[in-house]
Image (tube, helix red, strand yellow):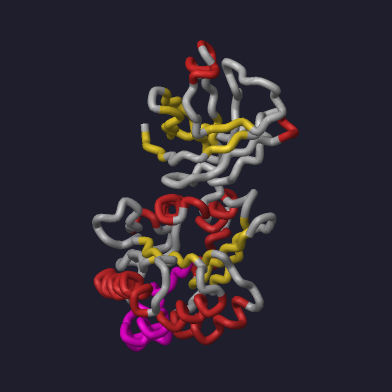
Amino acid sequence: MSGMRRKIMLLGSSITQRSFSLEHSGWGAALQNWYSRTADVLNRGAGGYNSRWLWKYLPQMIGGEKPDMSILFIGNNDSIQEGESQHVPIDEYKRNVVSILQYLYGIKRNMIVLVVSTSQSNQTLRPLHSNHIRTEYAEALHRIVQNYDEIHNLPKYMQYVDLISASSSNRIGTEDLHDGAHLNSTGNHKVYKAIKACINTHYPSFSPDFVQHKGRGQPKPNPLTLLVPLSPTTIIHTSISSSSLTTSASFPELASAPSSLPSSPISSRSSSPSPSPIPFESASFPPHMHDCSEYLEGDDDTGIPTLSLTVPIWHHLV
């Protein structure tokens, strides 16, 4: 993916189709704003769709795209009262969802898929919709996500986004709907928050806030620190941003007696002819390196010395 913009595809019914709406601060538009530098969000929502129709027309909707992430938000129409044209029995709904997931992973086996639960409706304004039935569909969806990777021998590239259970901090209530069925601004914000939190928690390297710093620009600070063991007696504290690690340190051993420093796990490969009390001012490397031996290189254009790091590193929250 280096040098290429990622693609995120939204699949679903009217709540997905309207997610780019500016009138109600759509969650899809918010997602595109968050990813504006790193990914394109493709909206393939279709008003009125249920899982049966989505599965039937999925190949045409996707076309030749191979998204890196898909967000599937389907089930509200399936769970409408039996006898209505949009209704899909729960067993067929489960089969359709599995077929959709199989198709997506047939396109790209390591695609990330976020499966969003059904959400509540205002039963006074929408008497054909039962929140009890919607909860049953959401529970069935959750079970599919929990078991899918084991059944189909896939890594855990799928997560469930809960918008309906009482325990969800982003539960959609009647106050989050502008017409009894579709999201208002607060509802859209809840969906966006839930999706963003899921990405940051389970797929942090896919987050647009995770960008490997190339030695240029000013990375945004992040409340993390890194402890890097340099010698039996020296530990330096370093700050980590969303995109890079920057270290500033002086070494007492080198300042007092450069030759007395034991075989150091950091060796300079810069053009500096002799050691300095401060052998380097700053350096950057991707923050996802931990518990492994890696190397650290500075950018020649910045004048940062080129160093190699061959010791384990780890991070912790402060």
Q: Is residue 301 left or right of residue 121?
A: right
Asked whether residue 188 is in view, the answer is no
- Identified at 61% across, 34% down, the residue is 307
Q: How many badges with numbers are in the image?
A: 0
Front residue of 124 and 225: 225
Residue sitting at the far front: 259
Residue 2 sits inside the magenta stretch: no
Q: Quadrant of residue 171?
A: bottom left
The C terminus: image quadrant: top left
- Identified at 32% across, 86% down, the residue is 91
Q: Position of residue 278 (x, y in %)?
A: 58, 18
In the image, residue 154 above or below residue 230: below
Residue sitting at the far top: 256
- Identified at 44% across, 50% down, the residue is 200
Front residue of 311 and 143: 311
Front residue of 208 and 122: 208
The N terminus: image quadrant: bottom right
Which contiguous range is marked in magenta?
71-97
Front residue of 185 and 158: 158
Q: Is residue 174 left or right of residue 247?
A: left
Q: Position of residue 41 (x, y in %)?
A: 60, 61
Q: Position of residue 247 (x, y in %)?
A: 53, 28
